[in-house]
């Protein structure tokens, strides 16, 4: 199992932080009894990933960013040790 080079703990996965575009339908929310405007109602309709090659792969225990590309992240997870980190 790989060892995080920052916290020196064994990990079997990485957390990936990725950019996304979220789409919502936004409508006025009203009180049913008084018809008074309560604010906006946000109804989530879609999530699309942004392919900008700007993902962060982090340790799930100490949250340190370890890699910025999927190839390095995969090599790390497939090996017992990995020297190159951010």
Image (cartoon, rainbow, N blue to C red):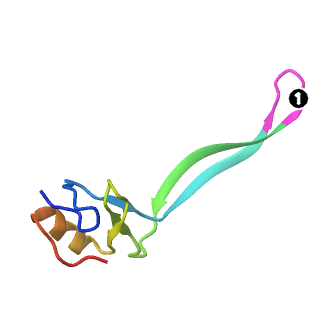
For mark 1, does the 10 Å Cα neighbourhood hold few (<14), some (14 to 19), or many (20 or more) residues? few
- Closest to the observer, 47 or 11: 11
State the quadrant of the C terminus. Answer: bottom left
Secondary structure mainly formed by the magenta segment: loop
The magenta segment: 29-37
Q: Is residue 47 left or right of residue 54?
A: right
| Residue placed furthest toward the front | 8
x, y percentage for residue 73?
23, 68
**Residue 86 colored in magenta in the image:** no
x, y percentage for residue 44?
58, 46
**Residue 31 colored in magenta in the image:** yes
| Residue placed furthest toward the left | 80
Q: Is residue 27 left or right of residue 64?
A: right
- Closest to the observer, 64 or 48: 64
Image quadrant in which you'd find residue 37 = top right
State the quadrant of the N terminus. Answer: bottom left
Q: Residue at x 86, y 20 (%)?
A: 33
Q: Residue at x 70, y 48 (%)?
A: 26
Image quadrant in which you'd find residue 15 = bottom left
- Closest to the observer, 70 or 13: 13
Image quadrant in which you'd find residue 53 = bottom left
Secondary structure found at label 1 = loop
Q: Residue at x 15, y 61 (%)?
A: 2
Q: Residue at x 23, y 68 (%)?
A: 5
Tag 1 residue:
35
x, y percentage for residue 64?
36, 65
User: Is residue 24 positioned above or below 16 on the image?
Assistant: above
| Residue placed furthest toward the top | 33
- Closest to the observer, 14 or 81: 81
Q: How many marks?
A: 1
């Amino acid at each position: 199992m790989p060892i995080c080079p920052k916290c020196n703990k064994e990990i079997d996965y990485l957390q990936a932080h990725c950019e996304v575009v979220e789409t919502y339908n936004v409508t006025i929310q009203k009180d049913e009894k008084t018809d008074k405007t309560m604010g906006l109602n946000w109804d989530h309709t879609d999530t699309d990933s942004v392919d900008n090659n700007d993902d962060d792969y982090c340790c799930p225990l100490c949250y340190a960013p370890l890699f910025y590309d999927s190839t390095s992240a995969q090599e790390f997870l497939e090996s017992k040790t990995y020297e190159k980190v951010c």
